[in-house]
Amino acid sequence: MEDIQVTLSGGKVLQVLRGLRIQELAFSLGINSRIIAAKVDGVAVDLDRPLGQDCTVDWIPMDSPEGLDILRHSTAHLMAQAVQGLFPGTQVTIGPTIEDGFYYDFKRVTPFTPEELERIESRMHELAASNLRIKREEMPRPRAIELFRAMGEDYKVAILEEIPEEKVSLYRQGDWVDLCRGPHVPATGVIGAFKLTGVAGAYWRGDERNEMLQRIYGTAWHTEEALREHLRLLEEAKKRDHRRIGRELDLFSFHPLAPASPIFHPKGAIVYNELIAYMRRLYRRYGYQEVITPQIFDAELWRRSGHYDHFRENMYFTRVDEKEFGVKPMNCPGHTLIYASKRRSYRDLPLRYADFGRLHRYEKSGVTGGLTRVRSFSQDDAHIFCTPEQIEGEMTALLRMLREVYQAFRFGQIQVKLSTRPEHFLGSEEVWARAEEALAESLRKEGLEYAVNPGEGAFYGPKIDFVVSDALRRGWQLATIQLDFSMPERFDLTYISPAGSEERPVMIHRAILGSIERFMGILLEHCAGALPIWLAPVQARLVTVTDQQKNYAEKVFEELLAGGWRVELDGRNEKLGYKIREAQMAKIPYAVVIGDREMKDQTVSPRRRGGKTLKPMSVKEFVELLGQEVSGELRGEDLTVGAGD
RNA sequence: GCUGGCGUAGCUCAACGGCAGAGCAGCUGAUUUGUAAUCAGCAGGUUGUAGGUUCAAGUCCUAUCGCCAGCUCCA
């Protein structure tokens, strides 16, 4: 047998025997224990694949993203094998990998119980221990259809009938077989660090008209340590859950009598209003005008805007004087009424109307949760009416404003997504194409990288969404900028051009924080409840050492209050350590200690949330310190009192 | 809306179909305290709601409301 030439990823070229298995090659190089699969000429393949001709080989290590993906896919198979062994008659459907794990959808009459999940998990460990070889097999599609039909696997048959290729691959481990493109790990013994995390219903092919399948979720890692670390992170995320923080810090609550509608307590309302106040300050600089519009409009308005046709199911209605009225789910139609209240000249544009009006949308019961998806909320909403020529300038200003805001909140990387025409849309295809091009152009000019989401646009226009990453590196969609050529049309909005003709303005819908409720939830998780001083409901708490200092403490308290600071006085008859602990757990940026020494010197001893004790200073100095921190925070400088404190 | 899980004191959680309990928080008293928990006592409940099975229901069954995870949806 003659040799073939194998080029390794490092550029090294080897002469090997034709037909040599990749695994054997890895073994001879002494790296077989770290390798899970390989790419031959760029295509990921199993390790037992023989090398038939000159080729390049790139190793896929166990702990690489690709390696983990393969491992998770194989773990999904292992789970399916365990399930079918334990529960004969259960059909397999699909079992893809997801971030950090995998799932597999099964067709079974009864759902899996948590106890069964445990049994499946232990069976999986048994199967892994027996280290079954995982073998790839190829066969013509019709034969595979026959095979799976004989096994009673209706869903696999359905999948096979839609596969275009005439040759398909199967994977066998022990007496179990599954249709799969692969690649997989060489044997089940490689799999070990996994945990089944949950069970849920899921529709066949993700369509709610189809029958429901039973989905089992799991996570899998290359080592036990990595698995433990992952589970620890999940615990950490749970501790940061904004619903928990909201209750612990007495910010907001929910009540069954107002499902999916947060009730903001005094401290939560401070945060809420500070967020709005912050946006208002920006609005003055960026040339926005705030407006106030009705909560309820004649249904006629919603018919004209198109919401009635498209989103009636998600709106609240009421009947008064034999007429139907709709509670506003959006501010935009109201703003068109202001625009249309008089003749507009090109000289008036752009007009930027901001509105913090309360919106109500009926969200289906299963989709609501915490502050992230509610039925009653408000947004830092604004609509810009401008000429088509002004779009670019407006977009530039918007992108600048957006950066400023995200810097103030320390959100890291921003991903940009351009969403294009959806299935249901208003207006003509030509108008859509024009709008999409305008958005793409502004992004390119701003030098922002973006991804395209085909078909994800709003029904009235294309949009740009901005996804930020929080402290746990989770992505959240916050800002959205939507171009709208349709609404001005529907409300027959016009302006007089320099030439004297009537022209159609363009409308830009935009929000930077998005819903204030949702933003607050995300922010709370981002900073684990330790809000920056400018947002903290209580900025400092004065704690006396004994009640001997009560009078002096009250004097300091009054002084800080007069300076506009949100401050509390804890003069209770408790030990200092106890009071410090409570201030710390309430995530108050400063606990200000006042004892005999301070009283004597007319000073205070601030202690930062993180535990750092500052040297005694006068009240005036402390106020200066607070002021500096607030302005530094708003400029986006490093936090002195941060989430990590 | 769909599938599953869970609703016990303000919070976190116990209680085989057989007397509803603990810790923390709260209140009262003592303690006058120096940077993450002082001690003692007291009080706290129609076990989400409505039916049913049973001699007996927090526990079993049915309905309903809410919450959670996921699916679908998200102007």
Image: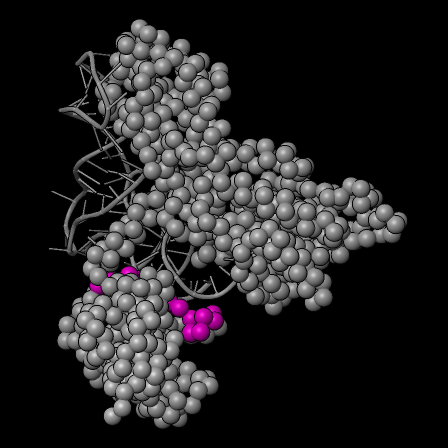
Placement of the N terminus of chain A among the 4 image quadrants: bottom left
Q: Is residue A573 above or below residue A222?
A: above
Q: Is residue A521 above or below residue A70?
A: above
Does the stretch in magenta take in A274?
no
Nearest the eye: A290 or B30: A290
Part of the protein shown in magenta: A193-208
Query: What is the quadrant of residue A303 in the picture?
Result: bottom right
Q: Residue at x 19, y 71 (%)?
A: A30
Nearest the eye: A403 or A49: A49
- Expressed as whole percent of the image width and height from the top left, the position of residue A56 reads 35, 77
Does the stretch in magenta take in A207?
yes
Query: What is the quadrant of residue A244 in the picture?
Result: top left
Does residue A262 appear in this view? no
Does residue A221 appear in this view? yes
As drawn, which residue projects farthest toward the top? Answer: A600
Q: Is residue A480 left or right of residue A536?
A: right
- Expressed as whole percent of the image width and height from the top left, the position of residue A600 reads 31, 6
Q: Residue at x 42, y 90 (%)?
A: A166
Dominant secondary structure of the residues highlighted in magenta in the image: strand
Placement of the C terminus of chain A among the 4 image quadrants: top left
Query: What is the quadrant of residue A609 in the picture?
Result: top left
- Expressed as whole percent of the image width and height from the top left, the position of residue A137 reads 30, 87
Nearest the eye: A556 or A166: A166
- Expressed as whole percent of the image width and height from the top left, the position of residue B20 reads 19, 42
Q: Residue at x 46, y 86 (%)?
A: A164
Q: Is residue A479 above or below residue A462?
A: above
